[in-house]
Image (spheres, rainbow, N blue to C red):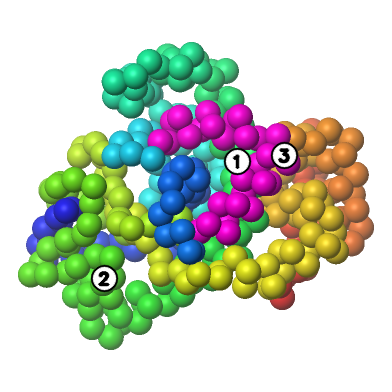
């Protein structure tokens, strides 16, 4: 059981993230691929993602990421530095900026009862090439396992935000906390929640940030190190059949309309990206990435602009509307 005690000042300092977090979604979705939690809700997603990872040639790379994010009681905190940071660049840069000493300490703890693989050993030493590979792997995995489900994720996050806002406006901080039941139980100035082991999270005057996650199941999760800024990532109520509903909305129809690869290119361009960035993210040749970006630009779904010596591409409002079923 997890316990968090609140004073009146702690309630006043409470923060509620308005978005899911890029790195928490990566890590928690990796864990979902290693367990059978909430099978009715997530098994269709698991099947689809495994097939897509295999088709993209990312199965081996994903296994390496799972080594760093195992289904177990401990995940290295450096992998989840955000408190509702949905921007990929911000999330990845925060991971890659982890001090070398902390990298080593957390990876030693992760592998304390088993041999550390060579790739993790290089990462623990803070090698620039190992960090670069980690960043590339995270982006490639996210593009296949998380980004294609953005519509469903945004809908669930938006519904959650609406419920929290209504509760806070109607009944204040106490009502806000009560609205998280049954995932979080608010009782006599304390949060109680299911957890793999007994733990008291001490706020010590620091603001707690509540972060919703589409891929969080069974119980909330927090950082392992007590000295880090406190964050509590919590599940969202999802119903079986969400994947089929999302597919009817736009995803599968877009695949038939644009083709699978071109749809993935459109999905990846929620932020500016160069042709070489598209190629690296989706494991395409530069010529293929350029061709797909050109077709999408001619259709008005992508715009291109020069930034320094690079040409960057980004999804247009029309592309956004098409992707979200508008």
Q: What residue range appears in magenta?
A: 42-70
Above-or-below relation of 257 to 248: above
Question: Upstream in the sequence, badge 3 or badge 2?
Answer: 3
Seen at 38% across and 40% down, the residue is: 71
Label 1 and label 3: CA atoms lie apart by: 10 Å
Residue located beneath label 1 in the image: 141
Seen at 23% across and 47% down, the residue is: 196
Instruction: Specify whether residue 68 is painted magenta.
Output: yes
Above-or-below relation of 263 to 161: above
- Considering the numbered disc 3 on the image, is that residue within a helix, a strand or a loop? loop
Instruction: Specify whether residue 295 is painted magenta.
Output: no
Give yes or no for contact between labels 2 and 1 (Cβ–Cβ under 8 Å).
no
As drawn, the label of residue 182 is 2
Question: Upstream in the sequence, badge 1 or badge 3?
Answer: 3
- Considering the numbered disc 2 on the image, is that residue within a helix, a strand or a loop? loop
As drawn, the label of residue 115 is none
Q: Whole-percent x and y of residue 247?
A: 68, 67
Question: Upstream in the sequence, badge 2 or badge 1?
Answer: 1
As drawn, the label of residue 56 is 3
Q: Whole-percent x and y of residue 4?
A: 15, 56
């Amino acid at each position: 059981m997890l316990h968090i005690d609140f004073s009146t000042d702690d309630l006043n300092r409470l923060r509620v993230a308005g978005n899911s977090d890029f790195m928490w979604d990566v890590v928690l979705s990796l864990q979902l691929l290693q367990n059978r939690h909430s099978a009715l809700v997530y098994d269709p997603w698991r099947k689809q993602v495994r097939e897509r990872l295999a088709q993209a040639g990312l199965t081996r790379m994903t296994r390496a990421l799972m080594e760093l994010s195992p289904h177990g009681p401990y995940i290295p905190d450096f992998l989840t530095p955000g408190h509702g940071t949905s921007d990929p660049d911000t999330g990845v840069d925060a991971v890659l900026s982890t001090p070398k000493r902390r990298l080593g300490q957390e990876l030693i703890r992760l592998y304390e009862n088993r041999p550390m693989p060579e790739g993790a050993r290089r990462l623990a030493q803070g090698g620039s090439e190992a960090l670069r590979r980690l960043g590339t792997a995270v982006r490639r995995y996210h593009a296949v396992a998380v980004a294609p489900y953005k519509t469903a994720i945004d809908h669930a996050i938006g519904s959650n935000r609406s419920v929290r806002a209504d509760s806070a406006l109607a009944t204040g901080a106490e009502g806000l906390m009560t609205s998280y039941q049954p995932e979080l139980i608010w009782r006599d100035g304390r949060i109680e929640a299911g957890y793999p082991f007994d733990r008291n999270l001490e706020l010590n005057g620091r603001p707690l940030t509540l972060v919703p996650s589409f891929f969080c199941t069974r119980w909330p999760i927090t950082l392992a190190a007590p000295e880090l800024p406190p964050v509590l990532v919590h599940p969202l109520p999802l119903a079986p059949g969400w994947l089929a509903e999302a597919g009817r909305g736009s995803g599968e129809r877009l695949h038939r309309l644009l083709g699978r690869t071109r749809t993935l290119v459109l999905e990846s361009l929620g932020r500016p990206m160069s042709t070489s960035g598209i190629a690296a993210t989706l494991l395409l040749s530069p010529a293929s990435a350029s061709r797909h970006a050109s077709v999408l630009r001619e259709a008005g779904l992508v715009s291109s602009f020069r930034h320094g010596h690079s040409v960057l591409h980004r999804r247009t409002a029309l592309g956004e509307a098409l992707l979200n079923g508008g």
